[in-house]
Image (tube, rainbow, N blue to C red):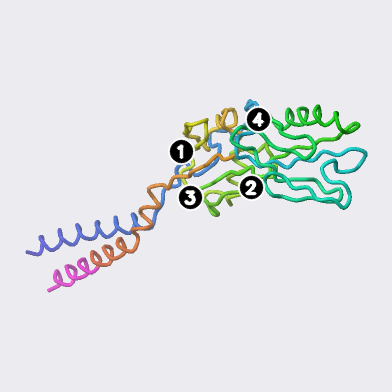
Amino acid sequence: MKKVYKRSKLFLGLMALGAVVFSSCGSTQNAVYFANVDTARFTQVIKADYKEPLIQTDDILTISVQSLGQDAFAAPGAVAAGAGGAVASGGTAVSGFLVNKAGNVELPMLGIVKLAGFTTSQAIEVIRTKATQFYKDPTVQVRFANYKITVLGEVIKPATYTVPSEKVTVLDAISMAGDLTVYGKRDNIMLMRDNGDKKDIVRLNLNSTNLISSPYFYLKQNDVLYVEPTKAKSAANNAPRTRLITIGIAAATLIVTILTKF
Protein backbone atom coordinates (compact mmCIF):
# COMPACT_ATOMS: atom_id res chain seq x y z
CA MET A 1 0.00 0.00 0.00
CA LYS A 2 2.85 2.35 0.84
CA LYS A 3 4.33 1.83 -2.63
CA VAL A 4 1.02 2.91 -4.17
CA TYR A 5 0.96 6.05 -2.03
CA LYS A 6 4.55 6.87 -2.94
CA ARG A 7 3.85 6.48 -6.65
CA SER A 8 0.75 8.63 -6.33
CA LYS A 9 2.74 11.24 -4.45
CA LEU A 10 5.43 11.32 -7.16
CA PHE A 11 2.85 11.49 -9.97
CA LEU A 12 0.86 14.31 -8.38
CA GLY A 13 4.02 16.18 -7.52
CA LEU A 14 5.15 16.12 -11.15
CA MET A 15 1.72 17.29 -12.27
CA ALA A 16 1.82 20.20 -9.83
CA LEU A 17 5.28 21.21 -11.00
CA GLY A 18 4.17 21.08 -14.63
CA ALA A 19 1.11 23.20 -13.92
CA VAL A 20 3.19 25.81 -12.12
CA VAL A 21 5.70 25.97 -14.96
CA PHE A 22 2.90 26.19 -17.56
CA SER A 23 1.12 29.01 -15.75
CA SER A 24 4.19 31.10 -15.01
CA CYS A 25 6.28 30.83 -18.15
CA GLY A 26 5.64 32.60 -21.46
CA SER A 27 7.55 31.96 -24.63
CA THR A 28 10.13 34.60 -25.57
CA GLN A 29 10.56 33.14 -29.05
CA ASN A 30 10.28 35.68 -31.86
CA ALA A 31 10.14 38.59 -29.40
CA VAL A 32 13.02 40.57 -30.92
CA TYR A 33 12.75 42.82 -33.98
CA PHE A 34 15.08 41.91 -36.88
CA ALA A 35 16.48 38.92 -35.01
CA ASN A 36 18.25 37.71 -38.15
CA VAL A 37 20.76 40.59 -38.03
CA ASP A 38 24.28 39.38 -37.26
CA THR A 39 25.35 41.42 -34.23
CA ALA A 40 28.99 40.56 -34.80
CA ARG A 41 29.32 42.51 -38.03
CA PHE A 42 27.99 45.45 -40.02
CA THR A 43 24.76 44.72 -41.90
CA GLN A 44 23.33 46.70 -44.80
CA VAL A 45 19.84 46.10 -46.17
CA ILE A 46 18.38 47.38 -49.45
CA LYS A 47 15.41 49.60 -48.61
CA ALA A 48 12.13 49.37 -50.49
CA ASP A 49 11.45 51.99 -53.15
CA TYR A 50 9.15 54.72 -51.88
CA LYS A 51 6.23 55.51 -54.13
CA GLU A 52 4.12 58.58 -53.51
CA PRO A 53 0.53 57.67 -52.64
CA LEU A 54 -2.14 58.48 -55.18
CA ILE A 55 -5.09 60.72 -54.43
CA GLN A 56 -8.29 58.69 -54.16
CA THR A 57 -11.99 59.42 -54.00
CA ASP A 58 -13.18 60.49 -50.54
CA ASP A 59 -9.72 61.85 -49.67
CA ILE A 60 -9.70 65.28 -48.05
CA LEU A 61 -6.97 67.62 -49.27
CA THR A 62 -5.45 70.76 -47.85
CA ILE A 63 -4.99 73.04 -50.87
CA SER A 64 -3.45 76.49 -50.87
CA VAL A 65 -2.97 78.78 -53.89
CA GLN A 66 -1.11 82.01 -53.16
CA SER A 67 0.00 84.85 -55.39
CA LEU A 68 2.28 87.69 -54.25
CA GLY A 69 1.94 86.57 -50.65
CA GLN A 70 -1.87 86.56 -50.66
CA ASP A 71 -4.22 83.61 -50.54
CA ALA A 72 -5.74 83.43 -54.00
CA PHE A 73 -8.80 81.64 -52.63
CA ALA A 74 -9.66 84.28 -50.06
CA ALA A 75 -9.05 87.98 -50.45
CA PRO A 76 -8.65 89.97 -47.21
CA GLY A 77 -12.01 90.24 -45.51
CA ALA A 78 -13.60 87.63 -47.76
CA VAL A 79 -14.54 84.08 -46.83
CA ALA A 80 -13.99 80.97 -48.96
CA ALA A 81 -15.21 77.49 -48.20
CA GLY A 82 -13.88 74.21 -49.56
CA ALA A 83 -16.08 71.36 -50.71
CA GLY A 84 -15.29 69.59 -47.46
CA GLY A 85 -16.69 72.44 -45.40
CA ALA A 86 -13.48 74.04 -44.07
CA VAL A 87 -13.41 77.82 -44.20
CA ALA A 88 -10.56 80.28 -44.62
CA SER A 89 -10.30 84.05 -44.77
CA GLY A 90 -7.79 86.87 -45.00
CA GLY A 91 -4.67 85.03 -46.20
CA THR A 92 -5.23 81.72 -44.40
CA ALA A 93 -4.75 78.57 -46.49
CA VAL A 94 -8.01 77.01 -47.59
CA SER A 95 -8.35 73.35 -46.53
CA GLY A 96 -10.80 70.49 -46.44
CA PHE A 97 -11.46 69.91 -50.15
CA LEU A 98 -13.21 66.59 -50.60
CA VAL A 99 -12.34 64.46 -53.64
CA ASN A 100 -15.78 63.44 -54.88
CA LYS A 101 -16.82 60.13 -56.44
CA ALA A 102 -15.84 61.41 -59.87
CA GLY A 103 -12.32 62.15 -58.59
CA ASN A 104 -12.76 65.93 -58.74
CA VAL A 105 -12.44 68.85 -56.35
CA GLU A 106 -14.14 72.20 -56.82
CA LEU A 107 -11.85 75.13 -56.12
CA PRO A 108 -12.84 78.79 -55.78
CA MET A 109 -12.11 80.70 -59.00
CA LEU A 110 -10.47 77.67 -60.62
CA GLY A 111 -13.63 75.56 -60.82
CA ILE A 112 -13.65 71.76 -61.08
CA VAL A 113 -10.22 70.08 -61.14
CA LYS A 114 -9.70 66.33 -61.48
CA LEU A 115 -7.07 65.13 -58.99
CA ALA A 116 -7.84 61.46 -58.32
CA GLY A 117 -5.07 59.21 -59.60
CA PHE A 118 -2.39 61.88 -59.17
CA THR A 119 0.24 62.19 -56.46
CA THR A 120 0.25 65.42 -54.45
CA SER A 121 3.30 66.56 -56.47
CA GLN A 122 1.41 66.02 -59.72
CA ALA A 123 -1.72 67.65 -58.28
CA ILE A 124 0.33 70.77 -57.50
CA GLU A 125 1.33 71.08 -61.15
CA VAL A 126 -2.24 70.48 -62.37
CA ILE A 127 -3.58 73.23 -60.09
CA ARG A 128 -0.67 75.57 -60.86
CA THR A 129 -1.33 75.28 -64.60
CA LYS A 130 -4.95 76.25 -64.10
CA ALA A 131 -4.15 78.99 -61.58
CA THR A 132 -1.76 80.80 -63.97
CA GLN A 133 -4.83 81.78 -66.00
CA PHE A 134 -5.94 83.99 -63.10
CA TYR A 135 -2.85 84.73 -60.98
CA LYS A 136 0.73 85.72 -61.60
CA ASP A 137 3.37 83.23 -60.44
CA PRO A 138 1.04 81.30 -58.13
CA THR A 139 2.46 79.17 -55.34
CA VAL A 140 0.52 75.94 -54.78
CA GLN A 141 0.56 73.51 -51.88
CA VAL A 142 -1.37 70.25 -51.69
CA ARG A 143 -1.35 67.86 -48.75
CA PHE A 144 -3.52 65.07 -47.43
CA ALA A 145 -5.70 66.19 -44.52
CA ASN A 146 -6.99 62.71 -43.67
CA TYR A 147 -4.00 60.42 -44.26
CA LYS A 148 -5.10 57.70 -41.83
CA ILE A 149 -3.44 54.49 -40.67
CA THR A 150 -5.23 52.02 -38.36
CA VAL A 151 -3.33 49.74 -35.95
CA LEU A 152 -5.30 47.00 -34.18
CA GLY A 153 -4.66 43.97 -32.00
CA GLU A 154 -1.81 43.42 -29.57
CA VAL A 155 -0.40 46.95 -29.39
CA ILE A 156 -0.31 49.36 -26.45
CA LYS A 157 -2.61 51.95 -28.06
CA PRO A 158 -4.78 50.46 -30.82
CA ALA A 159 -6.42 53.29 -32.76
CA THR A 160 -6.76 55.08 -36.09
CA TYR A 161 -3.99 57.67 -36.50
CA THR A 162 -3.93 60.70 -38.78
CA VAL A 163 -0.39 60.88 -40.14
CA PRO A 164 1.17 64.30 -40.86
CA SER A 165 3.53 62.86 -43.48
CA GLU A 166 2.81 60.74 -46.54
CA LYS A 167 6.07 58.82 -46.05
CA VAL A 168 5.17 56.48 -43.20
CA THR A 169 6.50 52.96 -42.62
CA VAL A 170 5.21 49.91 -40.79
CA LEU A 171 7.63 50.72 -37.96
CA ASP A 172 6.35 54.30 -37.77
CA ALA A 173 2.77 53.04 -37.37
CA ILE A 174 3.74 50.55 -34.67
CA SER A 175 5.67 53.27 -32.86
CA MET A 176 2.61 55.57 -32.90
CA ALA A 177 0.60 52.72 -31.37
CA GLY A 178 3.09 52.46 -28.50
CA ASP A 179 4.80 49.26 -29.75
CA LEU A 180 3.55 45.68 -29.53
CA THR A 181 2.54 44.16 -26.22
CA VAL A 182 4.47 41.18 -24.89
CA TYR A 183 1.72 39.02 -26.40
CA GLY A 184 2.00 40.43 -29.93
CA LYS A 185 3.01 37.96 -32.66
CA ARG A 186 5.91 39.78 -34.30
CA ASP A 187 6.46 37.33 -37.14
CA ASN A 188 2.94 37.46 -38.57
CA ILE A 189 1.63 41.05 -38.79
CA MET A 190 -1.39 41.33 -41.08
CA LEU A 191 -1.61 44.31 -43.46
CA MET A 192 -4.92 45.09 -45.18
CA ARG A 193 -4.95 47.59 -48.04
CA ASP A 194 -7.67 48.92 -50.32
CA ASN A 195 -7.13 48.09 -53.97
CA GLY A 196 -10.09 49.41 -55.93
CA ASP A 197 -13.06 47.22 -55.13
CA LYS A 198 -10.78 44.60 -53.57
CA LYS A 199 -8.78 44.31 -50.36
CA ASP A 200 -5.13 43.18 -50.46
CA ILE A 201 -4.04 41.15 -47.41
CA VAL A 202 -0.37 40.35 -46.78
CA ARG A 203 1.69 39.03 -43.86
CA LEU A 204 4.75 40.87 -42.57
CA ASN A 205 7.56 39.55 -40.37
CA LEU A 206 9.13 42.03 -37.95
CA ASN A 207 11.82 39.49 -37.06
CA SER A 208 13.35 39.65 -40.53
CA THR A 209 15.18 42.47 -42.29
CA ASN A 210 13.32 41.39 -45.44
CA LEU A 211 10.57 43.68 -44.16
CA ILE A 212 12.68 46.73 -45.02
CA SER A 213 12.91 45.59 -48.65
CA SER A 214 9.23 44.69 -48.88
CA PRO A 215 6.99 46.75 -51.20
CA TYR A 216 4.64 46.98 -48.21
CA PHE A 217 7.23 48.57 -45.90
CA TYR A 218 5.82 52.01 -46.76
CA LEU A 219 2.15 52.34 -45.88
CA LYS A 220 -0.62 54.02 -47.84
CA GLN A 221 -3.66 55.97 -46.68
CA ASN A 222 -6.35 53.84 -45.02
CA ASP A 223 -4.00 50.86 -44.48
CA VAL A 224 -4.86 48.62 -41.53
CA LEU A 225 -2.28 46.73 -39.47
CA TYR A 226 -3.46 43.88 -37.25
CA VAL A 227 -1.16 42.28 -34.68
CA GLU A 228 -2.24 38.76 -33.75
CA PRO A 229 -1.93 37.48 -30.16
CA THR A 230 0.45 34.64 -29.33
CA LYS A 231 -0.55 31.41 -27.62
CA ALA A 232 0.85 32.89 -24.43
CA LYS A 233 -2.03 35.42 -24.46
CA SER A 234 -4.53 32.57 -24.38
CA ALA A 235 -2.59 30.96 -21.55
CA ALA A 236 -2.58 34.27 -19.65
CA ASN A 237 -6.35 34.57 -20.07
CA ASN A 238 -6.68 31.07 -18.62
CA ALA A 239 -4.30 31.82 -15.74
CA PRO A 240 -7.04 31.93 -13.03
CA ARG A 241 -8.26 28.48 -14.03
CA THR A 242 -4.68 27.22 -14.19
CA ARG A 243 -4.01 28.53 -10.68
CA LEU A 244 -7.09 26.69 -9.36
CA ILE A 245 -5.88 23.48 -10.99
CA THR A 246 -2.44 24.01 -9.48
CA ILE A 247 -3.90 24.58 -6.02
CA GLY A 248 -6.08 21.48 -6.38
CA ILE A 249 -3.14 19.33 -7.40
CA ALA A 250 -1.02 20.73 -4.58
CA ALA A 251 -3.79 19.97 -2.10
CA ALA A 252 -4.11 16.42 -3.41
CA THR A 253 -0.34 16.00 -3.15
CA LEU A 254 -0.44 17.19 0.46
CA ILE A 255 -3.22 14.71 1.30
CA VAL A 256 -1.26 11.83 -0.26
CA THR A 257 1.85 12.91 1.66
CA ILE A 258 -0.07 12.87 4.94
CA LEU A 259 -1.58 9.46 4.20
CA THR A 260 1.80 7.91 3.44
CA LYS A 261 2.94 8.79 6.97
CA PHE A 262 0.13 6.83 8.62
Residue indicated by mark 4: 42
Residue 165 is left or right of residue 201, and the answer is: right
Which mark lies nearer to you, 4 or 2?
A: 2
The residue where tag 1 is placed is 188
Residue 37 screen position, x and y as percent: 57, 33
Q: Quadrant of residue 262?
A: bottom left
Instruction: Please tell me whether mark 4 or mark 3 is closer to you in this view.
Output: 3
How many discs mark residues in the rendered view? 4
C-alpha separation, residue under disc 4 versus residue under disc 1: 26 Å
Extent of the magenta region: 251-262
Question: How much space separates mark 2 and mark 3, taking CA atoms?
Answer: 20 Å
- Look at the magenta stretch and give its main secondary structure: helix
Q: Local crowd at mark 2 within 10 Å, few (<14), some, or many (≥20)?
A: some
- Secondary structure, mark 1, is loop
State the SS at label 3.
Answer: loop
Determine which residue is flagged by label 3.
Answer: 154
Is 134 included in the stretch rendered in magenta? no
Q: Are marks 2 and 1 in contact (CB under 8 Å)?
A: no
Q: CA distance from mark 2 to mark 1?
A: 24 Å
What residue appears at the point 50 percent right and 35 percent down from the top-left corner? 205
Of residues 61 and 86, the one drawn nearer to the viewer in this rendering: 86
